[in-house]
Amino acid sequence: MEHINQILTNFEIPKGDFEFNTMSNGLINDTFLVSSKGSAKYILQRINTQVFSNVEALINNMDLVLPELHGKGYEKINLSKTKEGGTVYRSGGGEVWRLMNFIAGSQVFNTTRNPEVAREAGRIIGLFHHLLSGFNTSLLKETLPDFHNLNFRFRQFGEALKNAKPENIVRAKKAIDFVHENIDGLLGIGFSELPVRVCHNDTKLNNILFSSDHRALCLIDLDTIMPGTFLYDFGDAARTIVNSAPEDERDLDRIHFDEGLFRNLVEGIAINKNLLQKNEIEQLPSGVVLMPFLHGIRALTDFLENNRYYKVSYELQNLDRCFSLFRFAELALVKRDFMKTCTREVLL
């Protein structure tokens, strides 16, 4: 950890005898909890510049949006300044680091069965959008071009399929068939009719900090903040809240669509009055199908390309992810009428 200790000296923080522990929730960046005398103080991150190749865009978006993300019921995240006055430190070896405050007593959940956690997740996502509702989205840059562009992801999948190892195509046959059976309906979602908002774009449950009494505090992992539609953030939240199984669950019988938790999530969104337009509300069920499908096709593509993008702990993890995600997308398709009724009742 000597290298990391040296990195820390480049930030304007009080000197201390620091300890570091690796945090493993993130799939992209390397994240460390920085403690002093047994007390957590900071979160230190090394930005994955292979994934976020346009670091300037990422810095631009964070510097513009973070100051707006504070208010009653929303905990502020602060980036520590470097000794040169910036919000990231670039090492001589080309690494890019940032340091932010640790929110004491905070915790994350990968999944939940708790109605209050689901409701609070909805509230904090809605509050995030409320706080940024007047923000000029044209000021933001694309940190990950075509991140939620299904046409683009389908083309990537097609190229990966053409070049994949034959044995991997056999292993993934059911997932490949699912893509071809469902792609047309999802490509028909009318995004051009929806308002463009500042979106987090990765609102899975473990990107929300909670207090010890299950009160949602704020959203974290903000690198994917870009213009988008509310469908993205709602769909991503639903796929990780309404389903209590992990994203790479191998036993597909354990994947469920919990109608109660879905209603709790929507009730949380509704706490932020008049947030959504009628056409957004009508399209919310499409987002709940789209996002697991989109993440599934990305995981499938990565598997076919021999795991180039996501961190994996075993060879077939991306394939397990895509099977799990597609199973939830399949369940969401079955629940479309329920979702339409629920969102209209609660939000209209």
Image: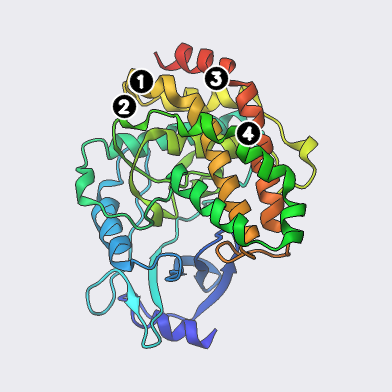
Marks 2/4: CA distance? 25 Å
Label 3 Cα neighbours within 10 Å, binned few <14 / some 14-19 / many ≥20: many
Q: Which residue is mark 1?
A: 279
Callout 4–callout 3 Cβ contact below 8 Å: no
Q: Nearer the viewer, mark 2 or mark 4?
A: 4
Q: Nearer the viewer, mark 2 or mark 3?
A: 2
Which of marks 4 and 2 precedes in the sequence?
Answer: 4
Q: Which labelled disc corresponds to residue 258?
A: none
Callout 1–callout 4 Cβ contact below 8 Å: no
Q: Residue at x 40, y 53 (%)?
A: 224
Q: Which residue is mark 3?
A: 339
Question: Element under label 3?
Answer: helix
Q: Which residue is mark 4?
A: 181
Q: Which residue is mark 2?
A: 193
Marks 1/2: CA distance? 8 Å
Quadrant position of residue 301 = bottom right
What quarter of the picture does the N terminus occupy? bottom right
Marks 4/3: CA distance? 22 Å
Marks 3/1: CA distance? 15 Å
Callout 2–callout 4 Cβ contact below 8 Å: no
| Amino acid type shown at disc 2 | Glu
